[in-house]
Image (tube, rainbow, N blue to C red):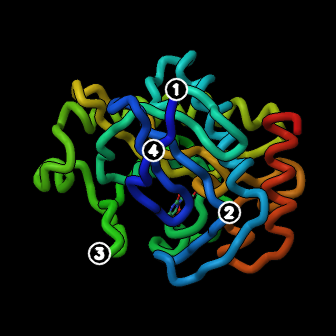
């Protein structure tokens, strides 16, 4: 596979064309942002960990019946993935109250829900990724009703798998954000990443935060948290 011109640069990844029109290469950076890009920094080694963790989990999710964009890990930071058009929805599942849920509804962090919740944000930086519901998403033609139903089904399957897998590593999966994409033939697949950037991970015993909240909230030992997650999940 030949890496060609850069197609796009996002906050945490770059995307390159290849000689195959159906395949692109994602290249994970160490750059970190929060609060819609207002806060900027670097988390040394993050790109390598997020690349490897995402690929590990996407391989397993394929086995669990969730189609993904993953094709092949090419290097520490680079992965070949299927080219998709991203469905402009951030799909957020929560098992425990935290973050914007706690803020919006005025509840403490750490309340364990009887059932997971699902919500959508409209992926639009200029609007600040506003919360929307499935009817709004359908009205705005961000996805069809059937696509939204399928995305919800996949998101809950991901939650079931991730929750169990992480618990085996002594981690509570508090919440996470997924993005889905559409292949040229219309197939919906899981895209983007699953990493400490996009999930909240708390140590089961101590409650220690092992995710990007350490960066967002200036809690210190940010790199250590990413390394600890890599050790627990990937054994390195
Ligand atoms: P929130 O509590 O800030 O809404 O975040 C919910 C989850 O989504 C959390 O695991 C972090 C993740 N997330 C992203 O991946 N990208 C984002 O831009 C935001 C705001 C949250």
Q: Mark 2: few, some, or many residues within 10 Å (few <14, many ≥20)? A: some
Could you tell me how far apart the alpha carbons at marks 2 and 4 are, in whole angstroms? 21 Å
Which residue has dot 1 on it?
71
Could you tell me how far apart the alpha carbons at marks 3 and 1 are, in whole angstroms? 32 Å
Q: Position of residue 145 (x, y in %)?
A: 17, 37
Q: Position of residue 173 (x, y in %)?
A: 67, 46
Give the foreground label among 3 and 4. Answer: 4
Which residue has dot 2 on it?
30
Q: Position of residue 10 (x, y in %)?
A: 46, 62
Indicate left or right for 32 with 26 as reference: right
Disc 3 under 8 Å from ligand 1? The reply is: no
Indicate left or right for 187 with 6 as reference: left
Tell me what residue is drawn at x 86 percent, y 69 percent: 221
Which residue has dot 3 on it?
127
Q: Mark 3: few, some, or many residues within 10 Å (few <14, many ≥20)? A: few
Q: Are marks 2 and 1 in contact (CB under 8 Å)?
A: no
């Amino acid at each position: 596979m030949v890496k060609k011109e850069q197609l796009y640069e996002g906050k945490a990844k770059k995307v390159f064309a290849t000689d195959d029109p159906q395949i692109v290469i994602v290249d994970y950076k160490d750059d970190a942002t929060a609060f819609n890009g207002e806060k900027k920094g670097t988390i040394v080694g993050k790109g390598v960990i997020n690349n490897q963790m995402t690929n590990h989990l996407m391989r397993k999710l394929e086995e669990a019946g969730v189609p993904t964009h993953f094709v092949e890990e090419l290097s520490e930071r680079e992965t070949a993935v299927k080219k998709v058009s991203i469905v402009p929805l951030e799909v957020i599942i929560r098992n425990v109250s935290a973050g914007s849920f706690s803020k919006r509804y005025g509840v403490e962090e750490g309340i364990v829900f009887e059932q997971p919740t699902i919500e959508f944000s409209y992926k639009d930086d200029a609007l600040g990724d506003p919360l929307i519901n499935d009817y709004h998403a359908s009205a705005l033609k961000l996805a069809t009703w059937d696509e939204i139903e399928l995305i919800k089904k996949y998101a809950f399957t991901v939650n079931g798998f991730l929750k169990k897998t992480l618990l085996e590593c002594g981690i509570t999966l508090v919440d996470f954000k997924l993005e889905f994409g559409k292949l040229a033939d219309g197939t919906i697949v899981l895209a983007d990443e699953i990493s400490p950037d996009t999930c909240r991970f708390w140590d089961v015993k101590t409650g220690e935060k092992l995710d990007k909240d350490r960066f967002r909230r200036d809690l210190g030992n940010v790199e250590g948290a990413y390394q600890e997650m890599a050790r627990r999940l990937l054994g390195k």
